[in-house]
Image (cartoon, rainbow, N blue to C red):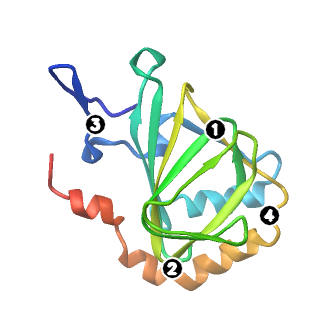
Amino acid sequence: MATTPEVTDGVKIYRASAAPPLEESGAVRSDFGDNTELRDVAVRLASSECSQARLLVHQSSDEGGMSIVYLFFKPNFPLFRHAHDVNSLYVVVSGTVVGLMGEKTLRPGDCFAVKAGTPYYYTAGPEGVEVLEMFRDADTATVIYTDENDGRLEEAQDAVRSNAEAWRQITSGPLYRANAGTS
């Protein structure tokens, strides 16, 4: 399932309000290998309790082949070390990415590119982070979780325990709050 664009005189408009949840779109798959403990924690972290993901655009090759995913990670959300099977480009829309690859902090307007097969990770800053993830010429993208999480599993479990109450109060990211009730 993908967003159906509005078409006017050759211009296509993809509405954020019509974007399906990423897990329902079929555009992204997860590969945890045999690591069931990691899968269980990652599935919980991917829930709306901790983060939000929507498929904003998913074009066929004939339409241009672009896919854009909206990701909102709530404050202090620890993204697991993982890789993708496609090249990806990210734009930070709001908040901060803290500790990209252990040391870099990115702010709104900063971008980063990750080559297919390259493991990476980061943590959302204290206000959370919204990013747009873009990839092209792929019907689906696979998120490949690595076994080398260097304590990220325990960090994620601690983050869920420490932030559960605060996260329940946050129902959507700034982009979706700004778009509420519009069409």
What is the spatial separation of the Cα atoms under label 3 and label 1, in whole angstroms?
22 Å
Identity of the residue drawn at 61% across and 48% down: 113
In the depicted structure, whether residue 114 falls above or below residue 165? above
User: Closer to the N terminus: mark 3 or mark 2?
Assistant: 3
* Identity, as a three-letter code, of the amino acid under mark 4: Asn
- Provide the residue designation for mark 2: 164
Residue 63, by quadrant, is top left
Q: Which mark is residue 87?
A: 1
Q: How many C-alpha atoms fall within 10 Å of the one at disc 4: few (<14), some, or many (≥20)?
A: some
Tell me whether circle 3 and circle 1 mark residues in contact (CB < 8 Å). no
Q: Which mark is residue 131?
A: none
Tell me whether circle 1 and circle 2 mark residues in contact (CB < 8 Å). no
Locate residue 132, reporting x and y percent. 45, 51
Left/right placement of residue 162 relative to residue 9 reads right
Please name whichever residue, 26 or 79, is drawn nearer the observer in this view of the structure.
Answer: 79
Locate residue 58, reporting x and y percent. 43, 31
Whether residue 166 is visible, yes or no, is yes
Residue 159, by quadrant, is bottom right
Q: Nearer the viewer, mark 4 or mark 1?
A: 1
What is the spatial separation of the Cα atoms under label 1 and label 2, in whole angstroms?
33 Å
- Provide the residue designation for mark 3: 14
- Provide the residue designation for mark 4: 149
Left/right placement of residue 145 relative to residue 19 reads right
For numbered disc 1, what is the local secondary structure? loop
What is the spatial separation of the Cα atoms under label 4 and label 1, in whole angstroms?
21 Å
Residue 181, by quadrant, is bottom left
